[in-house]
Amino acid sequence: MNQQELPEFDWSAAALEAAERFGTPCYLFSWERVLHVWHVLKALKGDIPVRHWLSLKSQPLRRLVQEWRSLNTGIEVVSEFELRAALSAGFSTENILVNGVGKHHWMEGISVSGLRVHFDSVDEASRLAKTAARLAWRVGLRFALRKQVDPDEPLFYTQFGLSAAEARATVGALRAAGVALESAHFHLRSNVPAASEYSEALAEMGLRCQEANFSPRFIDCGGGLPCPGDDLPRDAHSSFKMAEFIEVLRSGVRAFSGVEEIWLENGRFVTGRAGALVIRVVDIKDRPECRYVICDGGRTNHALVSDWERHNVFSIPARSARSRLTTLCGPTCMAFDRLCRLELPDDVQIGDLMVWQNAGAYHIPWETRFSHGLAPVVWIDSNDRMSLVRQRETFEEWWSSH
């Protein structure tokens, strides 16, 4: 089995049980599949230890955060709510890494000592320097590198990180304020197609650190490991090899002196394949151009990522008639509410279940209340036992939120 692949999981049986017990639409989430990925990540070993931080924004489930803490590893947060969630789940500040943009607009009032914080801009660093020194924060810098481009418009860079000149000025200002400057960070993007891109980024960041007279103890390569099953038309992650990736990390950190750890912050790679969305067919319309299968869940409420990703989808029961171009639609009065358009057997019927796989990252945090309440979330433990970790939202809860 390829190191990026996971053992087979019976999503069909799980979907049938969940639909019967909890109704549709609903999300399923398997902790066992997270553990399989955790073992893959732990196998990334070299001369320098590799430390892993779960990106909380990708799947902000209380049960997941609690179980992840039991692995005695780190969590990465990018907002006040996420920081409060990590603290309430019992994470020590040693195991919390604060990233993101515009932190000075919410962190000036934070009185938590010993946090690890990556500054993203000159203004962040200048506004938070005194707070960082007073609370003994362990600080790093996020660098803006040439590979960090807008994936939709590659002629433009992203809004993240410090330029070379900004980094030099920020290092000087933080040292003058007595801040412990320890880590250097970059994040390329999601679904990085080849390990060589990390090599180029490490080489560039090494030069930036030399120019700033900064020797980081920790090198943070962000996340972005490709998640098989998330098919992005603009990317092809078949060339990514984990064995090559660890060699890239080993050789890349030679651009720095005195590195103690390599850090990785993956979210989608860890949780994406651990989830599925289960919906039910409620109506069907046959039209000359294609068949429209309308379900009780879809893009608008449950799967925003379907706007740019193609995931595997299958029906229960399995159908075997000739295939026909089909548009799988959600329940809202929005033409945008199209989960996918693909070839499906033309005997899919009202009442069938449809299972949208790889729904374990960014589906729940981007879920909407558009005309409907939030769906239940079903947790599947390591013994395949199901429990409800979030109830279906009632009308009273939905109405009070507007």
Image (cartoon, rainbow, N blue to C red):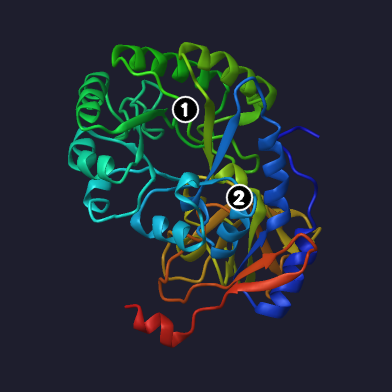
Q: Residue 200: horizontal and vertical position, in percent?
A: 47, 16
Q: Is residue 282 visible?
A: no
x then y, percent, for residue 128: 22, 42
Q: Residue at x 70, y 49 (%)?
A: 35
Query: Mark 2: which secondary structure?
Result: helix
The residue closer to the viewer here, 57 or 208, is 208
Q: Between tags 2 and 1, which lies in front? A: 1
Which residue: 64% across, 57% down? 275
Is residue 81 shown above or below 245? below
Where residue 329 is drawn, which disc sits there?
Answer: none
Seen at 50% across and 46% down, the residue is 95
Q: Which mark is residue 271?
A: 2
Q: Residue 46 occupies which quadrant of the picture?
A: top right
Q: Amino acid at mark 1?
A: Phe
**Residue neighbourhood size for the residue with mark 2, other residues' Cα within 10 Å, grouped as few (<14), some (14–19), many (≥20):** many
**Quick one: quadrant of the C terminus?**
bottom left
Kindly report the distance in space between the C-alpha atoms of the residues bearing marks 2 and 1. 25 Å
> Can you say whether 159 is above or below 205 in the image?
below
Q: Which residue is label 1 attached to?
A: 218
- Estimate the x, y position of residue 338 in percent, counting from the top left: 50, 58
Q: Considering the numbered disc 1 on the image, is that residue within a helix, a strand or a loop?
A: strand
